[in-house]
Image: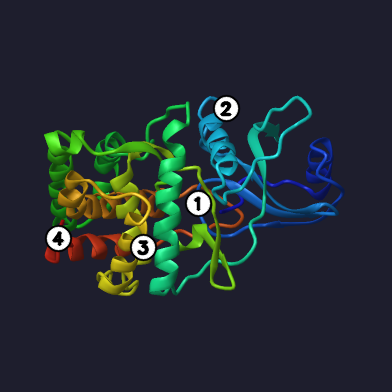
Amino acid sequence: MAVFTEVSFDEAAAFLSALDLGQLQNIKGAAGGIENTNYFVDTDQGQYVLTLFERLTFEQLPFYLHLMKHLAGCGIPVPNPAAAKNGDILHKLKGKPAAVVNKLRGHSELAPTADHCAGVGEMLARMHLAGLDYPHHQPNLRGLPWWNSTAPVVLQHTTAEQGKLLLGELAYQNHIAESSAYRTLPRGPIHADLFRDNVMFEDGRLTGFFDFYFAGYDTFLFDIGVCLNDWCVDLPTGRHDAGRADAFLAAYQSVRKLTAAERTLLPAALRAGALRFWISRLWDFHLPREATVLQAHDPGHFERVLRERLAHPVRMTA
């Protein structure tokens, strides 16, 4: 989350009142994340998150907002976008697309245990199944085509050795995407960014997933790889944590069994997840946008994760 567009107290108050969300009591810009403008807002009716979208368009946003509505209706604990009197859940504020969702209870667990990872794995599988009948389709906008187009832009900010690693991995991922095994992978709407700070817990119990604005139609395995690369690694080194990963995968498979192709391609998916976020963090770190509150992430972290995935592949047995 970040603040690129300033919204005054009076502007937010009028906006929230028009949505019948009550009288504004407090508004605070949210730090963390780097894509959209976010404010935590409290009214006499509840706590909400107000988002102004800085990159996503009016045409792209219905996919994300209606996906949250769909998942919420299926019992998945996700933020539920507030509707106007005419039923619209996509709004306009300061000339930009905007949405308001309820703030989830609890806090992010930034030092997860195996139990936390199991909770995430189980809920992710439930989310994947719940999304199978979601009628809208939009590709993962940060998928392979984006990696291919963005890699040449960020290469100038890498060393020769880093560039060789990045281009070599990109070639490998293009090769995997053309394989027959990859074409058989189960697909549907995925979160694609389910890091530790995008999940809430209260008293040890998972209370929700949020920040769906990187979601898209892609392989479920990519979603799993992204999660394992964050929830089940040692952050300083990027090394795999087998105990947490086993708990995550066992809980996931208690709801949805992985296919043979998914088990085979798990090492490639872990490398893909690391590459995706290495590229995007290089881009955001070296080509930043101006913002009032902005915390750029260290791109070196996912370079370390990728090197670990190459040196120590994580393999699954049947």
Find numbered disc 2 in the image and state the secondary structure of the residue it sits on. loop
CA gap, disc 2 and disc 3? 30 Å
The reply to whether callout 1 and callout 4 are in contact (CB within 8 Å) is: no
Q: Which residue is mark 1?
A: 34
Q: Which residue is mark 3?
A: 230
The reply to whether callout 2 and callout 4 are in contact (CB within 8 Å) is: no
Q: Which residue is mark 4?
A: 310
- Residue at 22% of width from left, 46% of height from top? 259
- Residue at 12% of width from left, 38% of height from top? 175
Q: Residue 103 in the image: state x and y as whole percent.
A: 66, 54
Find numbered disc 1 in the image and state the secondary structure of the residue it sits on. loop
Q: Is residue 116 left or right of residue 89?
A: left
Residue sitting at the far front: 254
- Along the line of sight, which residue is nearer the eye, 229 or 6? 229
Image quadrant where one finds the C terminus: bottom left
- Visible in this render: residue 165? yes
CA gap, disc 4 and disc 3? 16 Å
Going by the numbered disc 3, the residue's amino acid type is: Asp
- The mark closer to the camera, 2 or 3, is 3
Dot 2 or dot 3, earlier in sequence: 2
- The mark closer to the camera, 3 or 1, is 3
Dot 2 or dot 1, earlier in sequence: 1
Dot 3 or dot 1, earlier in sequence: 1
- Visible in this render: residue 179? no
Q: Residues within 10 Å of mark 3 (few under 14, many from 20)?
A: many
- The mark closer to the camera, 2 or 1, is 2
